[in-house]
Image: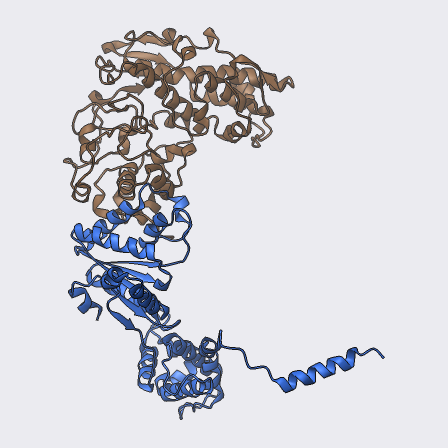
Amino acid sequence: MRKLPLTWNPAWFHHGASLWCLAAKIAHVATARVGAVLGLLTGATEQSRVLAWAADRKTISQVCEQLELPDKAATTLALRADPASLEQRQHINLGLRWCPECLASWYHTARFQDRRIRLCPWHRVRLRETCPYCTRSIDPFGRPWRCDHCSQPLVADPEHWLSGFKTKPGHDGLWPRLVPAAILAYEEHEHGVLCRPDKDGELSLKAHGRYLDFWQHAQLYESASALWDTILRDHRDCALQEPYGYYPHYYNLDFACPVAAAGRAVFGQMALDGAMRGAWSHQSVVQTAYVTLPARGAVSLEVRRALLRELPRAWLADSLMLFGEASRLGRTSARWEPHPAAFQGKALIKPWSNGSELVTKRPASWLEATAAFSAEKCPNRKALPGTWDPLKLLLA
Amino acid sequence: MLNTVLQTAELGMVLTAPTRFGKSAFIDEIEARFKRRKGGVVLRSTMTTGHAKGWENRFYRRLRGEEEGVESLFPQQNPKTALLRHIQNECDKVGSPVVVFALDEAQNLSIPQLDVLKELSENLLNMGHKPFMLLVGQPELLRLRDWLREHLRQDIVQRFMLRATVLRGMNSAADVRVLLRHTDSAVWPENSGRTYTAHFAPAAWTQGWRIEREAEGLWLAFLHHATKLGAGKSPDIGTQFVAQAQLALLQAVGMDAVHDVRRPMTPESSKMKSAVESSGFAESLTLGAKPAEPDDKADAKATRRWLRQTRYT
């Protein structure tokens, strides 16, 4: 195996630490971006950022070999989730989530990236997911422990990094076998997402006058990235081949691949065109998306998060059907606009016991079937098994 | 000797030798010893010429031991800081402040690069490290030292180039014997339980033949060859030439089913001659040599012949 040009010390590893945690230390020493280190270690690119959090076993074992890590490290460096499955990918947060107490000792665990976790199990501190200065989400590929947008540090500058990186985080790094309900933000339910009551959710973000705008946009970006990584994965190249245009709601969108066009139309409406290319977004939520969401303070943060996850899915399904039908009729140009009936946020919320709220969601399989229906006329469509009939699935 | 120099306050030394005298092997050995004894960190790099835009950053990365072309794969904001932090970390790992920069092909170093080395050594001294620049290169490196003296750059000479050592090759049969003895005892392939000689010439080995016995003959064969090529009567012969000849000899004996193992080979024997010829020693002496003087008589004859052939009658 080729030796990587990385400065590393096995003493920098502490049990339970994430691959990002190690990469950030290496990047600090090498004055590089964390993405460059992760790219060398796992082959992750901006279009596959999720590999930083959920790399496959083979890659992780190679990393362990390269960095001379103990065998047990392989189980904690990344989340055990399939990044190609929407059911599993939807819980992985691309933007950094961290416990300020843990990060003060340069510690981060991949489990923090699971959106279902709300509190650090060791310090019982709420996990942060936005910059404490500008409220933008933190690109894990950016500069180590620093916001790429405002350049402010997330923790104190590691002046004494030589000894600091070796210092243990103050806990054993063992993740609780049974995660206490108190640290969970939401749970998967048969009909949707069961969001736990969260009174001080918005307060935890409040660092900027427009904190909710940036946070909501970040959530939409997360949702869009999850869709590009899973449902739209096979059509990302189609979308990249299309000429880059303005937001398509002003005129018809010429297309070759209906799935890529549907993705571009929906994410163009949300100012999330960059998500397919893997570009990090620091914008605020756009008006078209905002009007369909509940007003500030009307719902808890976790409910809002669930709605923001559901909104792009609903719009995408609508758009996929439109472009799919257009392509079946032999059209190469169509226009999709957000329709009020496509997503009605308030209607999806149902009160539940113990102050929880249930947000109804569409199953991932339905979205997959919609994409498959629309992909019928995609020029780069992969051969599907003969028994696969998306129309039948949709009708069912 | 390096140990002695490291004990002093000197920050560098020059080591020169012609091609294939084992300079790289020497650096390998230093690297291995430092690693084994945890006496310090050895950063090995090969110096190249050229001062394209951004050379300074590339130079720092090269000093760290990075290969060519890594820059685009792994961009760094500040390669100098990265190098200093790398040294801090490596020294911390071995628990020693000593850091040796083994710069191969150091004759290619330019004045700005030497200035960078000077600044770097100062930075490292301020950080509590003990840097040492081992400048290894061709004999032209000594000319660079003289040039620096003449052009009032004593600061660089006094810092790194005060002490100069020439790496000698083999200049006696005894030297060759040491090398050949090692061939008889070194295991090859690894963990096979066989020696180098037994691996290449198994039949002769079982009959009791040892290559060490051929040391005198091999040395004389080199000597004859050198005299014939006008290299003087007591030349220094690069270790790698001898090693190459020894390998050729082993292969020749291995392939010869009826090799006479009772007597050592003479320097005039065909095996010895071809082993010395295949070592590349002759090419190193004649390569770039002045071409042979033109033979006026032969030239005149050739011209007359050409005129005869092209005459229109």
Q: Name which residue lies at 17% across and 56% down.
A: B96
The quarter of the displayed image where residue A195 is located: top left
Is residue A192 in view from this perspective? no
> x and y percent of residue A50 in the render?
37, 32
Q: Name which residue lies at 32% across and 18% down.
A: A215
> x and y percent of residue B232 in the render?
40, 85
* Tally of marks: 0
Q: Name which residue lies at 39% across and 31% down.
A: A83
Is residue A210 depicted above or below A276 in this figure?
A: above
Q: Name which residue lies at 22% across and 27% down.
A: A179
For the colour blue, the matching chain is B
The quarter of the displayed image where residue A230 is located: top left
For the colour brown, the matching chain is A
> x and y percent of residue A364 in the render?
43, 22
Is residue A151 depicted above or below B19 in this figure?
A: above
Q: Depth check: A299 or B84 in front?
A: B84
